[in-house]
Amino acid sequence: MRDITAVHPRLQIKAAQLKEQCSKQGISILFGECLRTSAEQDALYAQGRTKPGNIVTNARGSTYSSQHQWGIAVDFYLNMDVDGDGAKNDDAFNDSTGLFERVGSIAQAVGLGWGGNWKSIKDLPHLYLPDWGSTTATLKQIYGTPDKFIETWKEGKTDVEAADSVPSAKYSQTQFIMDIQSCTGSKVDGKAGRETLENTVTISATENRKHPAVVPLQKRLNVLGHNSGAVDGIAGSKFTSAVNSYQRDVLGYHNVDGKITARKNMWKSLLGMR
């Protein structure tokens, strides 16, 4: 479906902001794939497996694993003559001049996640609301199905506030990244890169339990539906439970350790880098 009005209201706002910011930098974009049905997702999953073409997704529609099914993702394409041949329609996905990386950077600056940061099947056109991490695991845990999640928009609820376990949707991933950058000595720009990751520290109930990074971590885990309790700056028992919940439900760990280890996968996931 290419109807952007069918996606999450906040994503519509972010998409409009992105389009405006891109235009200011001489980049014209439009939005293609928006809300997607399970049948449409399963058809994409079959491509390169049971149907001709290249593999383009690892997400089965029947498991609600695509962010598009939840209305929190859109794909963009270029609306400009990149190669200078006088036509635009042959340049929709022409990244020969690095335009997709530039759009991805702008998208992150306005508070969106970018599929170009993913390690398994980089998805350069893919943009998403990062409030629930880089997968749909948290949404499935809270709501079960996309239909139940989408109902919260129609009821006028502020999505994650609809779940008792999540107190607020106002603490965005961009703000989280900036707070982490600030308290770990990285350049504060809201864009998670090598420097941001390298400067992370191990946080647990026994290691750096009162580090300044604990406060933004508590806020972010709460927003994502992993209850770390009161935001008190102390990595205690509830913080450990929240870390274990995230490791198990989002990262798929069989052996959880209650620890956010410096420069490792949980940091990468929270920072939107995987």
Image (spheres, rainbow, N blue to C red):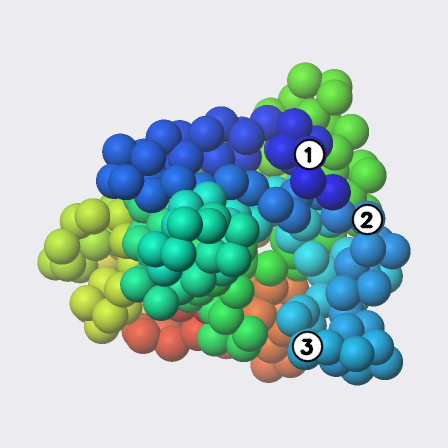
Q: Which residue is mark 3?
A: 55
The nearer-to-camera label among 2 and 3 is: 3
What separation in Å lies between label 1 and label 3 (alpha carbons)? 24 Å
Rendering coords of residue 77 (x, y %): 51, 50
- Amino acid type assigned to the residue bearing label 1 in the image: Asp
Image x and y of residue 133, in percent = 52, 54
Q: Secondary structure at mark 3?
A: loop
Q: Which mark is residue 3?
A: 1
Question: Is there any visible trace of residue 13 in the rendered image?
Answer: yes
Left or right position of 233 against 143:
left
Q: Which residue is mark 2?
A: 37
Q: Marks 1 and 2, how far apart in space?
A: 13 Å
Q: Are marks 1 and 3 in contact (CB under 8 Å)?
A: no
In primary-sequence order, the first of circles 1 and 3 is: 1
- In depth, the one of 177 and 75 nearer the eye is 75
> Which image quadrant: the N terminus?
top right
Q: What is the C-alpha distance between the residues marked 2 and 3?
A: 19 Å
Asked which secondary structure carries label 2, the reply is: loop
